Amino acid sequence: MIPAAFDYKRASSAAEAISLVSQYGSDAKFLAGGHSLLPLMKLRLAQPAMLIDIGRVKDLSYIKDAGNHIAIGALTRHMDVETSKVLREHAPLLSHAAGHVGDAQVRHRGTIGGSIAHADPASDLPATTLALGATYVVQGPKGQREIAATKFYKGFLESDLAADEMLIEIRVPKMQGAGWSFQKFNRRAQDWAIVGVAAWRRKGEAGVALVNMGSTPILATSVATAIAKGASISDAAAMASNEADPQSDLNASTDYRKHLASVLVRRALEAASK
Amino acid sequence: MTITEDKSTKIIGTRLLRREDPPLLTGEAKFTNDLNIPGALHLSVLRSPFAHAKIKSIDVSAALKIAGVVAVYTGKDLQSAWAAPMPCAWPVTTDMKNPPHFPLASDKVNYVGDGVAAVLATNETASRDALDAIDVQYEPLKAVVDLEDALSDKNIIHKDLGTNKSYTWPLLVEETPGCVEEAFKKSKYKVKERYVQQRLIPMAMEPRAIAAVPQPFGGDITLYSSTQIPHILKVMSALTLGIPEQQVRVVAPSVGGGFGSKLDVYAEELLCMALARKHNTPVRWVEERTENTQATIQGRGQIQHVELAADENGKITAVRVRIIGDMGAYLQLVTPGVPILGAFLYAGVYDIPKAYDFSCTSVFTNLTPTDAYRGAGRPEATYAIEMAIEALAREMKIDSFELRKRNYIKKEQFPYTAFSGLTYDSGDHLLAAEKAAKMTDLAGVRAQQKKQNVPGATRLLGVGMSSYFEMCGLAPSRVLASLNYSAGGWEAATVRVLPTNKVQVITGTSPHGQGHETSWAMIASEKLGVAPEDVDVLHSDTAISALGLDTYGSRSLPVGGVAIALACDKVIEKAKLIAAHQLECAAEDLQFVGGTFSVKGSPDRALPLAAIAFGAFTAHNLPEGCEPNLEAQVSYDPPNFSWPFGTHMCVVEVDTETGAVKILKYIAVDDCGNQINPLIVEGQVHGGVVQGIAQALFEEAVYDEDGNLKSSNLSEYLVPAASDLPSITTGHTVTPSPTNQLGVKGIGEAGTIGAAPTVITAIIDALSGLGVTTMAMPASPQTVWKTIQEATRGGKK
Ligand SMILES: Cc1cc2nc3c(=O)[nH]c(=O)nc-3n(C[C@H](O)[C@H](O)[C@H](O)COP(=O)(O)OP(=O)(O)OC[C@H]3O[C@@H](n4cnc5c(N)ncnc54)[C@H](O)[C@@H]3O)c2cc1C
């Protein structure tokens, strides 16, 4: 429980954070809520030499209605996402999912940006924003760029973010009254999902993403296509794992995960269609 | 002297809030790691990453170069520090095999977590950094992980022993030779079952922590440890280190839970003591959670083969049990005795003839040593008999509750001499079971179940139950002797009335969450007629409480609490002589009510205890031959175990599509005789039930075939939280124990004993329509789902 020695700097703005990370290079890591990074450091699975604390970068903690989409600052805590009136109205799937991250302590510390940047396929918000067709805004020494969620996740804990880039904003299209459901299957309420499903549906249109069904969050495109083509919910749900490649662990074998995915996708679509 | 019936002073039986809680809840309580000990060196232990390997070489040179590192020791370096190997106090048979076990391994490691080197540093960080800098070369050997594989002796762990078998312990009781075999031949119904008790990892909220502090002169040493057993630890550590016992003082500060895992003498305690003496400096150690999963004892770990025979009415005619017990790599303090504590209970609460054939063979494996864990042997036994009763009911196609009713020992049979020769002092199983059924609304639930569990339904209801008997309150010393246990089962108490009428109770029990300070004060308060807040309870420091046998096996109240009541009686006896002298009457003419002695029939001739206490202190006017001061000491050896019992029931809903199990209702009816403080009793039942549910649904130490622990932290070892549990409804029947004056029985382990079979039988009941007849623990969603798949595919197992 005692991490290896490290240095620590606190940044007060995104620009300062990026200049610090450029200075220290790949030995440096951003520290946001610390709820993914610090556990790894305590087990000495991560040993960054420099932590750049962005937890107090205030201007990146916001939720704004930006017309077609909602803009969420990367440092916004899960709890604020969960309770935001704007999100509850325009992206209720996301605020609901944020309410199912870990426990209350985790939700008060963890940030949406940290969750997405960490790119853990077992986390709830990467898959949820993927299902919603979100865009991520990142800033580096050379300026800003936008990355579609569908292009962001590269592998287990790997993303398109460069070492000197910082995620600054998450843009979530408004759901326009679509039905939705978030299904999280786990053994204890505060745990990561064994399998999770984030889904929305609007008449002949649907979006479904899967949590913990591969090395990245998975967009279940076969399911969405089947729904668009008029397939029944159960027929579409049977295709839940077409894009997935789930691993085995203590809680679930690959087969059981696939089975769960189809049950949960069916339940999610049924709930979203009500 | 019996408990005064004066209602105005009735303290026993009230829901007095625990005096322990305010300091615990406000953070004021001091745990071992909170002690500020200037100049202490920090110990870290390098642990083997292999389950079984030869140590080829250890290079500590890089570690020694780290700033702050004071010394690094290997097992070889410390060989001369030990006067004896680490203790096992329960050689269950005379030919039991017990490999030598030292705080650090020297030539060979035998489990992942086995200590290989010890680092001392001036701070925790340097001490931890040094572990990464020690270079150990290992030659991995084949690990023995599976119990049946261990039994085959294909790979022998401790070569010098020539076998992996530690012992075979039989208990064969036959009315006539061969009658068990005959019953199995002749009886109409037979069942033969196999159950696996998975290994569990005790997860006390406070991990183990130790500080060994040498005293400035005279060679004395004080050991602060988060332990359940300061007294036993004092004796055992003195013997292992070869120090005169009187030079060792053991103190257990606030202890954050134990559940049996702190009922042990651990390598780190001995290392801290030996190195503190060597360096003449305090040495401290605190366990990391992953170390807790690897280097603290584990619980359970048994394969059980259980057979029942029954006549045409379902009356049990014989019981046959074969156990393989998993000792782990070494024998810890009472490791071999754990299965034996259950050996007498495989007939449960049922009236069976002398036709009982039990045998346990215990084996070594390349896994963390096992030892006593809440219930120790008795949850395993109860699970087996209750599951087997269910199997028998299925075989007979009758309701399992009905089958239980036909076999319960009846109220009028108590005191009941069991097949084993043990006397069950009191009980009323039918009463407890019927109360549980009523609280569950069993008839209503069954009706709802009929409606809900129709073909094609995916949410199935099930009801489960278990009736248990617990053999606890360890224990009559003579019985322990017959089981080859190396110590007695008495408990000591001192009660002292101070000159200002405040009372000190000194107990040999060592609480670590049970609320003894509250309960013991209540006993003395009721006995002596003083307010509970005027009673101070001292414990867990061998310099204050010199005699004692500590806390485990639901013993503290039925042994230690009764000792306090007896010591109060002695104080009252002496006070009465002084009162008679001062009131100029005969002692027989005095009564003692509400803290005052008065002459029967003339209430104005009275003396309060306060006056007598002060008089005993000044000693100005005492009867001839009467010693000054008002205090008494008692060592009490109980005449029998205590026999709490009860019935638990629960209602579950199983989602057959995912395998998820939800407990909708949990009813626990426990009978622990008279209750000193019902609030504390309920707390014990809640915690116990949760630990039983945890075994049934959540927890398992999972090892791979190389002996690596896969569930070595709290995200993989699933300790349930409040949000994962049902609200538990407790009920009680009260059958006072006839063997002690308080009429009390133990309650610490009862919940754990009752809960696991209750939950598992409920799941099987829910799925019985699908042909499910077995369910492994923990019944995780995946396990439940797979079991359903196997049953519905028709190809069972
Ligand atoms: C007990 C517990 C239970 C949990 N349960 C769940 C759960 O059920 N579901 C779930 O989804 N999550 C869960 N989490 C994870 C939690 O949501 C984390 O807070 C989140 O995953 C990471 O956010 P953070 O702000 O804490 O990031 P940090 O831990 O600070 O950082 C994580 C990583 O992202 C990088 N990073 C952080 N912010 C940025 C940024 N703006 N730009 C670039 N890189 C950045 C860091 O350098 C680091 O590598 C749990 C955590 C704990 C401790």
Image (cartoon, coloured by chain):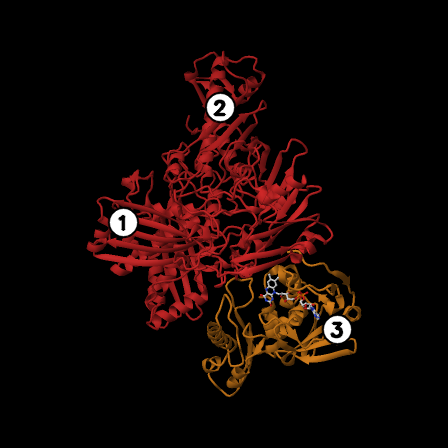
Chain colours: A orange, B red
Give A138 or B215, whichever is nearer the viewer: B215
Determine the secondary structure under disc 2: helix
| Residue A178 image point, x, y percent | 57, 78
Give A5 or B152, whichever is nearer the viewer: B152
Does the CB distance between marks 1 and 2 fall below 8 Å?
Answer: no
For residue A92, say whether it is visible. no
Residue at 78 percent across and 65 percent down: it is A11
Determine the secondary structure under disc 3: loop
| Distance CA(mark 3)–CA(mark 2) | 78 Å
Mark 3: amino acid? Asp
* Residue B43 - label: none
Give B262 or A196, whichever is nearer the viewer: B262
> Which residue matches tag 1?
B407
Q: Is residue A190 left or right of residue A118?
A: left
Foreground: disc 3 or disc 1: 3
Q: Earlier in the sequence, mark 1 or mark 2?
A: 1
Give B262 or B507, whichever is nearer the viewer: B262
* Residue A164 - label: 3
Mark 1: amino acid? Asn
For residue B301, say whether it is visible. yes
Q: Chain of mark 3?
A: A
Give the vertical position of B691 relative to B40 (above or below): below
- How crowded pointer 3 is (Cα within 10 Å; few <14, some 14-19, many 20+) is rated as many
Mark 2: amino acid? Val
Q: Chain of mark 1?
A: B
> Which residue matches tag 2?
B571
- How crowded pointer 2 is (Cα within 10 Å; few <14, some 14-19, many 20+) is rated as many
Determine the secondary structure under disc 1: helix
Give the vertical position of A234 relative to B295 (above or below): below
| Residue B463 image point, x, y percent | 36, 59
